[in-house]
């Protein structure tokens, strides 16, 4: 049928945009045994039938707990940045903040001078 498409993520959604800085992966061989040692962010695409919503979550690795989440209807750095700025006020400062290399997480407005380490 003309005009139909599958509701699934497009390939390469975690590729950094051209000109965005990529950071090294810091978690190799690191024992994560205490809260606030490592936080990470994830974006999950949620199809709704007519569009996508994007669940943005910041989680603590040791507690395996979602600290903050947002559910925007666009995939951009603003929702990630809001959650990142709110998390230290609620839960203290993280030692390492880990993300994938997607363009939302490699933009200057996300990777700029923030309260927590990356």
Image (cartoon, grey):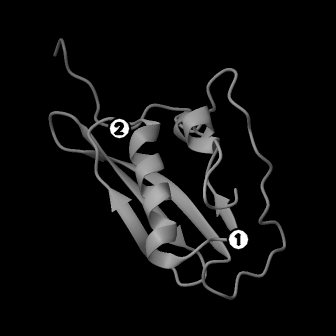
Q: Residue at x 16, y 16 (%)?
A: 1
* Rendered-image quadrant of the C terminus: bottom right
Q: In front: mark 2 or mark 1?
A: 1
Count residues near mark 2 (Cα–Cα under 10 Å), then give few for <14, some for 14-19, many for 20+.
few
User: Which label is found at residue 78?
Assistant: none
Residue that mark 2 sits on: 8
Q: Quadrant of residue 93?
A: bottom right
**The residue positioned farthest toward the bottom in the image shown:** 33
Q: Quadrant of residue 60?
A: bottom right
Earlier sequence position, callout 2 versus callout 1: 2
Residue 77 in percent (x, y) is at 46, 39
Specify whether 111 is left or right of 41. Answer: right
Against 34, residue 4 (above or below) is: above
User: Mark 2 to mark 1: distance in Å?
Assistant: 34 Å
The residue tagged with tag 2: helix, strand or loop?
loop
Residue 74 in percent (x, y) is at 32, 35
Q: Residue at x 63, y 32 (%)?
A: 16
The residue tagged with tag 1: helix, strand or loop?
loop
Against 36, residue 14 (above or below) is: above
Count the labels in the image.
Answer: 2
Residue 2 visible in the current orientation? yes
Q: Nearer the viewer, residue 114 or 73?
A: 114
Residue 65 visible in the current orientation? no
**The residue positioned farthest toward the top in the image shown:** 2
Specify whether 96 is left or right of 74. Answer: right
Count residues near mark 1 (Cα–Cα under 10 Å), then give few for <14, some for 14-19, many for 20+.
some
Against 10, residue 110 (above or below) is: below
**The residue positioned farthest toward the right in the image shown:** 29
Residue that mark 1 sits on: 95
Q: Nearer the viewer, residue 87 or 99?
A: 87
């Amino acid at each position: 049928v003309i005009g139909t498409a599958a509701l699934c993520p497009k390939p390469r959604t975690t590729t950094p945009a051209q000109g965005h800085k990529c950071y090294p992966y810091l978690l190799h061989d690191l024992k994560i045994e205490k809260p606030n040692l490592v936080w990470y962010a994830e974006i999950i695409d949620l199809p709704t039938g007519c569009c996508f919503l994007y669940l943005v979550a910041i989680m603590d690795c040791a507690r395996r707990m979602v600290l903050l989440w947002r559910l925007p209807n666009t995939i951009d750095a603003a929702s990630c940045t809001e959650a990142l700025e709110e998390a230290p006020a609620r839960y203290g400062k993280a030692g390492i903040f880990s993300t994938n290399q997607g363009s939302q997480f490699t933009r200057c407005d996300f990777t700029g001078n923030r309260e927590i380490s990356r």
